[in-house]
Image (cartoon, grey):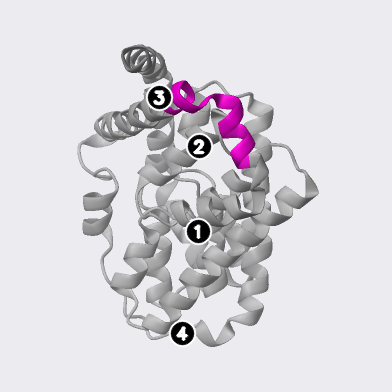
């Protein structure tokens, strides 16, 4: 059974490679052409910061959440805008969806929901967290940490960066696919699905905790579990909403107001859980 799972996992993963690389190449090209403009929009967003941040954040860009954290630490954007970016960004979800040939309508529905949740949550949090909007401009560089933690964003050109992303995420996909195949063999897919659906609210809290892991592995795991029908839409959204990539690491490194950092961390988790429960309770299918 394990050998069969290994064989199937290798075949399934290899099939994804050309689509995964194409998706990353397209996104690297987009970042190369629009990255500076996106940063400028975010810097000059003003009261519309959460809306612009959520729209910009939904397109995976290497280090965009890290950039937002750096801008927040320098007092350039508000806490609500930062949370909007964190909630909207989905790290590796989009390229995996594309490589798995998920219907475009379903992808747009999920991305649109993330943008809406990010914008609404950011605007509300701006109204509640005005005391966390500071203007001391203690900006620090975030590029070094971005490169260390998130796939060497800016070196070697877009083809090299796309290859690095593809290789790294492919390894994670293979591991998750293999583990899932073994679990299905031992436990049975129906029983696994029953566990997830039988504890939908508890699952939201748990998957959101996984989403907080500051690494692209978290979004890979959550996305694959959803595609394999191991978790519900609400659980998946909770995990991907809180998945800010290395943004949280950069926030804790660059912002010296540690109480703010922990409050933003707790707020991010609470918002992810809240919206995950709302989606679950409303029976929204994604």
- Can see residue 57? no
The numbered mark, 4 or 1, whose residue comes first in the sequence reads 1
What residue do we see at 50% from left, 83% from top?
Answer: 132
Question: In x, y percent, where is residue 128?
Answer: 64, 81
The numbered mark, 3 or 4, whose residue comes first in the sequence reads 4
The numbered mark, 2 or 4, whose residue comes first in the sequence reads 4
- Of helix, strand and loop, which mostly describes the magenta segment? helix
Label number found at residue 71: none
Which residues are drawn in magenta?
181-196
Per the image, is 194 magenta? yes
Question: In x, y percent, where is residue 23?
Answer: 44, 28
**Separation of marks 3 and 2 at Cα, in angstroms:** 18 Å
The numbered mark, 2 or 1, whose residue comes first in the sequence reads 1
Q: Which residue corresponds to mark 3?
A: 182
**Other residues around mark 2 within 10 Å, as few (<14) / some (14–19) / many (≥20):** many
**Separation of marks 2 and 4 at Cα, in angstroms:** 36 Å
Per the image, is 65 magenta? no
What residue do we see at 38% from left, 29% from top?
Answer: 179
Q: Which residue corresponds to mark 4?
A: 134
Question: In x, y percent, where is residue 280?
Answer: 71, 48
């Amino acid at each position: 059974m394990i050998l069969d799972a290994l064989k199937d996992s290798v075949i399934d993963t290899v099939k994804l490679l050309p689509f995964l690389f194409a998706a990353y190449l397209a996104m690297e090209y987009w970042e190369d052409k629009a990255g500076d403009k996106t940063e400028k929009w975010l810097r000059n967003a003003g009261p519309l910061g959460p809306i612009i941040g959520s729209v910009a954040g939904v397109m995976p860009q290497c280090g965009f959440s890290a950039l937002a954290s750096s801008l927040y630490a320098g007092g350039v954007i508000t806490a609500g805008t930062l949370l909007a970016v964190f909630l909207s960004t989905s790290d590796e979800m989009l390229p995996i969806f594309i490589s798995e040939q998920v219907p475009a309508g379903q992808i747009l529905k999920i991305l649109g929901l993330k943008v809406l949740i990010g914008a609404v949550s950011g605007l509300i949090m701006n109204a509640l967290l005005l005391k966390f909007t500071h203007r001391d401009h203690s900006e620090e560089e975030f590029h070094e940490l971005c490169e260390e933690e998130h796939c060497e964003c800016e070196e070697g050109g877009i083809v090299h960066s796309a290859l690095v992303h593809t290789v790294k995420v492919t390894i994670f996909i293979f591991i998750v696919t293999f583990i899932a195949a073994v679990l299905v063999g031992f436990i049975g897919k129906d029983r696994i699905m029953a566990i997830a659906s039988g504890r939908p609210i508890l699952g939201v809290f748990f998957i959101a905790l996984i989403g907080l892991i500051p690494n692209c592995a978290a979004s890979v795991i959550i996305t694959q579990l959803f595609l394999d029908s191991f978790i519900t839409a609400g659980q998946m959204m909770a995990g991907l909403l809180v998945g800010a990539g290395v943004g949280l690491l950069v926030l804790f490194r660059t912002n010296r107001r540690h109480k703010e950092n922990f409050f933003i961390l707790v707020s991010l988790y609470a918002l992810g859980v809240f919206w995950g429960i709302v989606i679950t309770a409303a029976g929204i299918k994604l």
